[in-house]
Amino acid sequence: MSDTITSLAAKLAEDTMKVMDETGDDRFFVEVGEVLGAASQSLEEAFLTEIRVRLAERKARAFVIKRLSTHRSKVKAIEKQ
């Protein structure tokens, strides 16, 4: 895949995630993907990959933060005893 497609897909994914965050429309990327697919299948595929990676990272990060928070709560509870 060309550097141009990769960089355009990454920037579009960033902007799309910002719109999703601001509007609360967590499926907006699907609509963007459909618009891309009508014009460039290569860019659509790169964009959807970028979105999936970002969504996966968010989910994993939330999991890590929750686990650490739970651990810290348990440690504090033990320290109070």
Image (spheres, grey):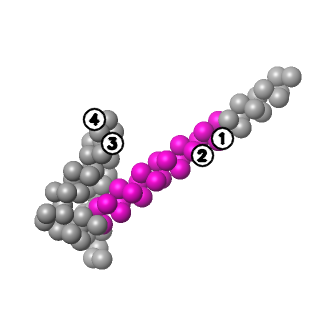
Which numbered disc flags the more N-terminal residue, 1 or 3?
3
Label 4 packing within 10 angstroms: few (<14), some (14-19), many (20+): few
* Residue denoted by label 1: 68
Q: Residue at x 53, y 50 (%)?
A: 60
Labels 3, 2: front one: 3
- State whether residue 32 appears in this view: yes
* Residue denoted by label 2: 64
Residue stretch in magenta: 46-69
- State whether residue 18 appears in this view: no
Q: Are marks 1 and 2 in contact (CB under 8 Å)?
A: yes
* Residue denoted by label 3: 26
Task: Kindly identify which numbered label has been placed on residue 23.
Answer: 4
- State the image coordinates of residue 28 (x, y, percent, origin top left): 26, 46
* Amino acid tagged 4: Thr
* Amino acid tagged 2: Val
Residue lying at the far right in this picture: please name it.
81
* Amino acid tagged 1: Leu
Q: Are marks 4 and 3 in contact (CB under 8 Å)?
A: no
- Mark-to-mark CA distance, 1 and 3: 26 Å
Residue 71: image quadrant is top right
Label 2 packing within 10 angstroms: few (<14), some (14-19), many (20+): few
Label 2, secondary structure: give it.
helix
- Mark-to-mark CA distance, 3 and 2: 21 Å
